[in-house]
Amino acid sequence: MRPGSTRLGRANLDRLAAGIRRPAYDRSRITPGIVHLGLGAFHRAHQAVVIDDCLAAGSSSWGIVGASLRSPDTRDALAPQDHLYTVAVRAAEGTEHRVIGALLDSLVARESPAALVERMVDPAIRIVSLTVTEKGYCHTPQTGDLDERHPDIVHDLNNFDAPRSAPGFIVAALARRRALGAPPFTVMCCDNLAANGHTVQRIVTQFAALRSRELGKWIVDNAAFPSTMVDRIVPETNDADRDAVANALGMRDAWPVMTEPFTQWVVEDRFTAGRPDLAAAGVELVADVKPFELMKLRLLNASHSALAYLGYLSGYETIADTMQDPHFARLAAQVMEEAAVTLTMPVGTDLAAYRASLLKRFANPALHHRTWQIAMDGSQKLPQRLLGAMQDRLGRDLPIATHALAVAGWMRYVAGLDEQGRTIDVRDPLAAEFAALAREAGPVAERLAPALLGVEKVFGPLGAEPRLREAVTTALGRLYKDGARRAVETHVSV
């Protein structure tokens, strides 16, 4: 048989190549208990793997029904293979393959909003989890409040039973459950939002209150929104990856995911209707997630963004490529060092070891995480990843030049032209606004930096802070004068 000529599926599990790990339970006995919104690669390489372990340990009523809010691509790829797929864990020494069976079904919200709401109303569903990226919450990142003017929110307020947005689906389903006298589900955000559980609770209740003050109060009084911290690097899958997985399996998987050996999930132990035995699957259940969340946002995500913007501008395609340049490796370490002083961690947390592990993970040559991919949606990411640490350092009278260089890299990137004058494919909800500001300001740091710092949705009041304005403008000027590689080299050599 030619590798990949047979499609992965339930009937073919016993024909997998030797050494391929597969579901350690009878899938026919598994029933759904979770609806997951945002059926992308990260969920399938992170939360679904943990739930797969829970099912193997006997939590048979916690299977997952996934929902893509827009694109049918994932459903179309996974449905013909009974929603089985492969996680390829890549390290320098080799790749391990595992077939995941936790995903039982998938829906496409845009095709039938009512079908997704109906699934979420089912009392068997006790958790609705989300990985819809920061922009999927239709909020203002700087304040954490619902953006009532967001087109999807405007639509959902006028089409309550046929929503488009994640908040719209959650509120529509909770309203139906309230009307039926059914208990609410737990809403578990797994995205990189500051205080993600509290933030999503605020967004959802603000949306609900626009429909009914009583509904908003019922959600506040009865539903749980535990905060979480999720950590695993998951690059996008390409055709070469699919071919490599087919060769390893001896059959074709249309939608495998690539990831690294490291994985971490910290969850606030607050659920309204039970949960699987997450601790048995390696999840850290805690009373307060915030220290871990800030640790990840300000150490991993902030340095990742710095490498992405400045690395892309320097011509590096992947994070691993960028880390081969010792000046960029030092930049990542410096971002972490300077952010670490803003953190207050529980006793016993080894921040130095965590920082060292991040540098090793970033440099993993087997993980092809593109700088362009990480650079997406920066307007939604900067407040949590970089601006919070800058504000805290300014409050302590500490310098912010390293973080300012990262912010300047973002500015140079969203202006839309690289250092060779080629157009950058900027993917961001505010891309058009940034492009207009860049055209008006031109490639002049003294004009562009204040213009972008004035974007309230990103910077809020912090954009008017004189010390921040000076540091960012100086860094942006250096990028225009010397280019990103030289600017980074100069900065870390001081």
Image (tube, rainbow, N blue to C red):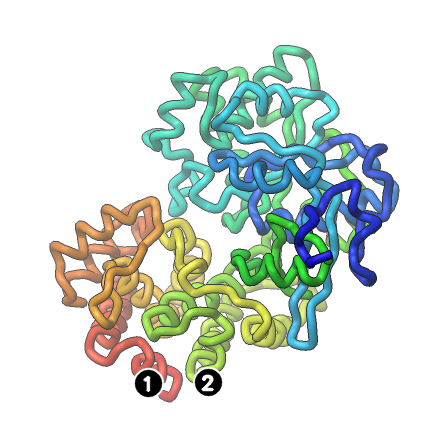
Q: Residue furthest bottom?
A: 493
Nearest the viewer among 378 and 105 is: 105
Q: Which amino acid does label 2 sit on?
A: Pro
Mark 2, secondary structure of its residue? helix
44 to 184, vertically: above or below? below
Rendering quarter of residue 492: bottom left
Instruction: Find disc 1 in the rendering and name its residue.
Output: 490
Structural crowding at the residue carrying mark 1, measured as other residues with C-alpha within 10 Å and reported as few (<14), some (14–19) or many (≥20): few
Q: Which residue is drawn at 38% across and 41% down?
A: 140
Nearest the viewer among 26 and 289 is: 26
- At which x and y percent is residue 334? 46, 77
Asked whether residue 376 is in view, the answer is yes
Instruction: Find disc 2 in the rendering and name its residue.
Output: 326
Nearest the viewer among 7 and 319 is: 7
- At which x and y percent is residue 456? 28, 47
Q: Residue at x 23, y 72 (%)?
A: 420
- At which x and y percent is residue 461? 30, 51
Q: Compute the Cα span from label 2 to label 1.
A: 12 Å
356 to 33, vertically: above or below? below
Q: Residue at x 70, y 49 (%)?
A: 6
Q: Is residue 491 left or right of residue 322?
A: left
